[in-house]
Image (cartoon, rainbow, N blue to C red):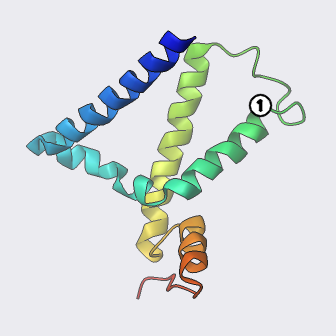
Amino acid sequence: MALENISTVFFSGALVMGFIILYQVKGIGKCLSVMTPYGRMGLTNYEMQSVIGCFIFSMWAFGSVFGSWGTTELFALGLVIYTMQVIFSKFWLKYFLYGPLEWFWRSATYLKLQPFRRK
């Protein structure tokens, strides 16, 4: 168990470093910039994934698909959800400065309503 936790930390670090290195490569960096809006709405996307996951994997939604889906199906589902969120984030940030939860968090932090719409 402890070895698995340590390897997870190293794998996560390697993944982050890999993205940093790829982002600095000229041609690849522009392709990765597609993820910028997704990152700017990180809290909203994280919570959206939780809501979507609860809906899909709950007994009352599609029946309990959690135990019947394999790794390939779950990976494909994750890619579909991620792609939809990237598209949604890019569209949202054309009209608004922040994601809805990011705006709420920022307003609560500063104890003052922050601007929300782009001018």
Q: Position of residue 72 (x, y in %)?
A: 55, 15
Residue at coordinates 69% horizontally, 16% vertically from top-left?
69
Q: Is residue 100 above or below residue 63?
A: below
Residue at coordinates 82% horizontally, 31% vertically from top-left?
62
Q: Is residue 113 above or below residue 74?
A: below
Name the residue type under label 1.
Phe
SS at circle 1: helix
Residue at coordinates 43% horizontally, 83% vertically from top-left?
118
In the displayed structure image, the side of residue 16 where residue 75 appears, left or right: right
In the displayed structure image, the side of residue 112 where residue 59 appears, left or right: right
In the displayed structure image, the side of residue 109 where residue 36 appears, left or right: left
Residue 68's quadrant in the figure?
top right
- Per the image, the residue denoted by label 1 is 57
Specify the farthest residue to the front. Answer: 2
Q: Position of residue 16 (x, y in %)?
A: 32, 35
Circle 1 residues within 10 Å: few <14, some 14–19, many ≥20: some
Q: Position of residue 74 (x, y in %)?
A: 60, 23
Picture quarter with the C terminus: bottom left
Picture quarter with the N terminus: top right
Q: Is residue 13 above or below residue 100?
A: above
Specify the farthest residue to the left. Answer: 26
| Nearer to me, 45 or 83 | 45
Residue 21's quadrant in the figure?
top left
